[in-house]
């Protein structure tokens, strides 16, 4: 397994943990502060969607030229 | 009533526009089964992006998403959560499936799996599960479309007629243009749906509460538990973290192997397009945010609809809103229903003929005959789902739950087939049947579960165990076809 794949797998686990118990319950689950008008519990999930998009872009761009 | 004519006029104009867009590509695809089912493996990034996104965003997202936020509060965030990682497995599975598709001529998931093990029964079992899942699912889409027209015309257009009108349009463009019709209409409908969701999602909180944050502050003051995960159950009690978390996990696993989505791996023009579709998908996912805002706007609205799913039409019909806006909403809801419904009709018909008829039952059909029979199956499937909607008096959602469980069990099967050299047909079949049965059992009888976790997680566990153990026990049966097969999957084209 390459370092790139290992890091990506690690991110996926981190993201899964952050969107469910225990990560979400511990760090993300409060109403304040509001960010962009959203309660923090809502913003937290949206932030992980955006982070996943960025990670996927990086993972894809650093991939082997296979086409 | 002139206002109602404006609403109907916009809806009819929208249906006509969908029809024109859907009819257009028909002349470009070849007259073969691969042309009709997989678009001659020619789809580019834009169409792939929308075909994936719009196929996933059904009536459930457009009406159910706001319904969840309205009724169950933060529990709705689970939908946003699983979609984030849900398509990621497809980044790896999709290109492998596409290579095999090119080499062996596959256009569906089950035939890809059956080929590796040389077992017709696997294609048969998967075809039956898929078609059984699609018909009630499709019925829900038809009902969704019919209901929206019924609500905005204040009952002037009955549900059966509205459903027939909308799905008549779908029938015409799917029959004529196959997957290309589905793809191009989904592109058109996807853009429309996104614009409308953002428009309404920002407009309603401003109009009703003076902004998004003031809206949430009012909810926080009145019902703080509404904004904290894991949210509420439909009965109104607090949901628990175990079920929330496993629901996210099970949905991530099941997401990419839904047959109508997975078979789009065979439509992309190359692997790069497929991978970029997955990379871009979270940008489509963000479109759930305004839909949840709409639902949260309903929490302190004052009056409530009979069913939570009707919160959006309920608010629109009870506010002083220009008829044009109501008409546009109506068209957006139809777009959501049609863009999932068309992919389901198309997939169910293709699977019934290719996997059920040709693979499992051994019908001898040449390419043109296959295409002809798939078209016949399109009519039969749509008619079946329509009759179910009109005449079935029970609850369609519970029918759907029955079917959902077994489909979710495709994931371990697909992964083992594409990656694991020692997997055998017996192992795959054992895992599939046991996992599916266990999920159905725990869905119907939640009291039997040892821990309060999502029913599907037990199914996946037993599925993986049986797949591995039975494969090990029957491993003498590895045939040379296997090593060829995995080599094809491994080698980038």
Image: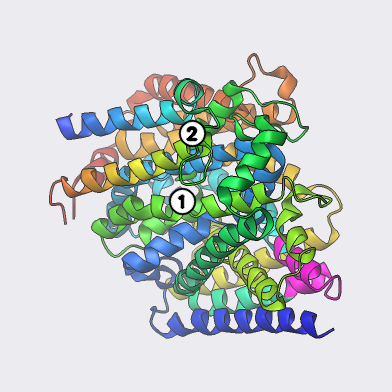
Q: Is disc 1 surrounded by few (<14), some (14 to 19) or many (20+) residues within 10 Å?
A: many
Secondary structure found at label 1:
helix
The chain under label 2 reads A
Q: Is disc 2 surrounded by few (<14), some (14 to 19) or many (20+) residues within 10 Å?
A: few
Dot 2 and dot 1 within a common chain: no
Q: Which residues are magenta?
A: B143-164
Secondary structure found at label 2:
loop
Q: Is residue B214 visible?
A: yes
Q: Disc 1 designates what residue? A: B285
B416 relative to B286, above or below: above
Give x and y (percent) for residue A61.
18, 49
Q: Disc 2 designates what residue? A: A33
A23 relative to B312, above or below: above
Q: Nearer the viewer, residue B418 or A63?
A: A63
Q: Nearer the viewer, residue B19 or A26?
A: A26
| Image position of B131 (left or right of B347) | right
């Amino acid at each position: 397994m390459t370092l790139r794949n290992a890091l990506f797998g690690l991110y996926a686990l981190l993201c899964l943990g952050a969107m469910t118990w225990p990560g979400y319950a511990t760090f993300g689950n409060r109403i304040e502060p509001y960010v962009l008008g959203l309660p923090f519990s809502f913003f937290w999930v949206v932030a992980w969607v955006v982070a996943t998009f960025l990670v996927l872009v990086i993972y894809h761009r650093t991939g082997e030229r296979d086409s | 009533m002139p206002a109602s004519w404006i609403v109907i006029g916009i809806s009819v104009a929208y249906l006509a526009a969908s029809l024109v867009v859907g009819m257009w590509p028909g002349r470009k695809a070849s007259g073969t089964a691969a042309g009709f089912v997989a678009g001659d493996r020619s789809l580019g990034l834009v169409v792939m992006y929308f075909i994936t996104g719009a196929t996933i965003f059904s009536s459930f997202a457009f009406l159910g998403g706001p319904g969840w936020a309205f009724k169950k509060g933060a529990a709705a965030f689970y939908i946003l959560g699983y979609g984030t990682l849900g398509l990621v497995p497809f980044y790896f599975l999709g290109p492998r499936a596409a290579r095999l598709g090119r080499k062996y001529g596959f256009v569906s998931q089950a035939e890809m799996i059956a080929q590796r093990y040389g077992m017709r029964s696997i294609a048969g079992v998967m075809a039956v599960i898929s078609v059984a899942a699609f018909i009630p699912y499709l019925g829900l889409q038809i009902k969704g479309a019919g209901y929206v027209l019924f609500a905005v015309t204040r009952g002037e257009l009955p549900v059966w007629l509205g459903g027939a009108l909308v799905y008549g349009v779908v029938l015409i463009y799917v029959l004529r243009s196959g997957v290309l019709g589905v793809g191009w209409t989904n592109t058109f409908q996807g853009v429309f749906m996104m614009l409308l969701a953002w428009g309404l999602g920002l407009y309603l909180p401003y109009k009703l509460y003076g902004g998004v944050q003031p809206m949430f502050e009012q909810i926080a003051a009145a019902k703080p538990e509404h904004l904290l995960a894991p949210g509420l159950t439909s009965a109104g009690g607090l949901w628990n973290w175990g079920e929330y978390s496993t629901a996210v996990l099970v949905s991530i696993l099941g997401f990419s192997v839904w047959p109508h989505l997975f078979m789009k791996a065979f439509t992309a023009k190359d692997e790069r397009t497929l991978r970029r579709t997955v990379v871009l998908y979270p940008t489509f996912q963000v479109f759930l945010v305004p839909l949840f805002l709409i639902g949260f706007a309903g929490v302190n609205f004052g009056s409530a609809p009979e069913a939570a799913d009707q919160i959006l039409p309920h608010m629109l019909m009870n506010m002083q809103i220009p008829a044009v806006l109501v008409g546009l909403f109506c068209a957006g809801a139809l777009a959501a229903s049609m863009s999932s419904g068309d992919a389901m009709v198309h997939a169910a018909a293709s699977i019934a003929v290719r996997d059920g008829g040709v693979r499992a039952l051994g019908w001898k059909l040449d390419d043109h005959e296959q295409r002809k029979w798939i078209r016949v199956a399109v009519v039969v499937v749509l008619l079946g789902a329509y009759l179910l909607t009109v005449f079935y008096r029970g609850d369609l959602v519970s029918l759907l739950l029955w079917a959902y469980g077994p489909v979710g069990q495709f994931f371990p099967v697909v992964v083992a087939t594409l990656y694991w050299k020692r997997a055998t047909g017996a192992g795959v079949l054992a895992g599939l049947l046991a996992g599916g049965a266990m999920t159905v059992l725990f869905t119907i009888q939640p009291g039997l579960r040892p821990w309060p976790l999502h029913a599907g997680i037990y199914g996946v566990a037993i599925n993986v165990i049986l797949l591995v153990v039975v494969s090990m026990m029957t491993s003498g049966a590895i045939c040379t076809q296997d090593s060829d097969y995995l080599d094809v999957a491994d080698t980038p084209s």
